[in-house]
Image (cartoon, rainbow, N blue to C red):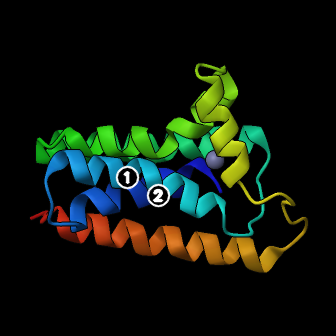
Amino acid sequence: MTGVTHMLAATAIYKVVPLGKPIVLAMAFGSHFLLDAIPHYELSTLLNYILGAITFSFLVILAFYTQNYYLLVAAFLGALPDLNWILGWNQSLGQFHSFMHVSNVLQQQSALIIAEAVFDIVLTFVILRQSKLR
Ligand SMILES: [Zn+2]
């Protein structure tokens, strides 16, 4: 999955689930593995970074506007397993991530790209609605 999807799903979980912060942030982190277990298409690393930077910038603006910086913590935790994969911080986490990640990433499946984009748009609306912007 893209970094966009991981960050938006984790943030949406944080915004929607009415439980304490430690539980919700753990769920935001855990959502990464559930999403990666779904067959999906991987964008190029460069495009993934660009879209991820745009998404994180949107979340920074939202966090500043709503004065709720925990949504950035949730987004970071949602993307953390991929960051760990790239930067190699923790070998055990990397091994678990690889174990949970679908083994054959699908190629040229435009339907999967569209489905993920629609999912991201829905997540964005959920986050904005839960942020009670006026
Ligand atoms: Zn991943």
Q: CA distance from mark 2 to mark 1?
A: 5 Å
Q: Secondary structure at mark 2?
A: helix
Q: Quadrant of the C terminus?
A: bottom left
Q: Is mark 2 within 8 Å of ligand 1?
A: no
Q: Quadrant of the N terminus?
A: bottom right
Residue 63 disc label: none
Residue at 81% x, 75% y: name it: 110
Q: Amino acid under label 1?
A: Ala
Tag 2–tag 1 contact (CB < 8 Å) = yes
Q: Position of residue 103 (x, y in %)?
A: 83, 57
Residue at 31% x, 72% y: name it: 126
User: Which is nearer the eye, 9 or 21?
Assistant: 21
Q: Amino acid under label 2?
A: Ser
- Asked where in the image residue 11 lies, by quadrant, the reply is bottom left
Above or below for 65 versus 34: above
Residue at 68% x, 27% y: name it: 86
User: Which is nearer the eye, 7 or 58?
Assistant: 7
- Residue 84 visible to an observer of this rendering: yes
Mark 2 — residue? 31
Mark 1 — residue? 28
